Structures are given as C-alpha cells and as structure tokens.
Amino acid sequence: MDNKLIINKKNLKGEDGYKTFSVRIKEDIVIKLNQLSTETNRSRNELINILLEYAIDNSKVK
C-alpha cells in the first residue's frame, strides 16, 4: 500500500479559462447590475459573463 500524499499542481492564474481585464461601465448600468445581482444571488462577475455570452451568441453584424 502506497501511503504517499498526492498533491496536484494548482493552475496558475489565467490558466483556468478566464482572463481579467478592466472595462468602464456607465453608472446606471452598474446600478441595474447590482439590483440583478441581489435578486439572483449571483455575483456581478457571474452575471456579466452570462450576459456577455448571451449577447455575443445572439448578435448579428450588418
């Protein structure tokens, strides 16, 4: 029986499929986002990802 403790390597920051960057957002949108966050018990970050993915998937370039 092998009693060794196995410790898996941790992914370095940025290797989890997510990237971090800054954006400027109008104050009224931040207020709406905060309200939606409170109503859904989701973080603003999680909501922004959901909303961006939906917008990209449902956009059409003319």
Image (tube, rainbow, N blue to C red):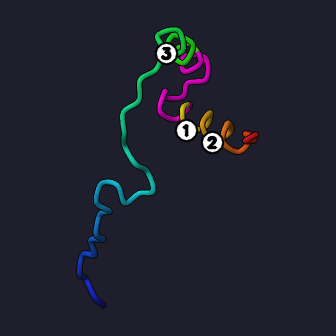
Numbered disc 2: secondary structure: helix
Question: Residue drawn 28% across and 60% down?
Answer: 12
Q: Which residue is mark 2?
A: 53
In front of the other: 61 or 7: 61
**Is residue 39 within the magenta segment?**
yes
Q: Position of residue 57 (x, y in %)?
A: 71, 45
Question: Residue drawn 46% across and 10% down?
Answer: 27
Q: Position of residue 58 (x, y in %)?
A: 75, 40
Would you say the residues marked 1 and 2 are in contact, meaning their CB atoms lie under 8 Å apart?
A: yes
Residue 49's tag is: 1
**Is residue 52 within the magenta segment?**
no
- Quadrant housing residue 29: top right
- Placement of the N terminus among the 4 image quadrants: bottom left
Question: Residue drawn 41% across and 57% down?
Answer: 16
- Image-based side of 4 in relation to 14, left or right: left
Numbered disc 1: secondary structure: helix
Numbered disc 3: secondary structure: helix
Q: Earlier in the sequence, mark 1 or mark 3?
A: 3
Amino acid type, label 1: Asn
Q: Which residue is mark 3?
A: 30
Magenta part of the chain:
36-47
Q: Earlier in the sequence, mark 3 or mark 2?
A: 3
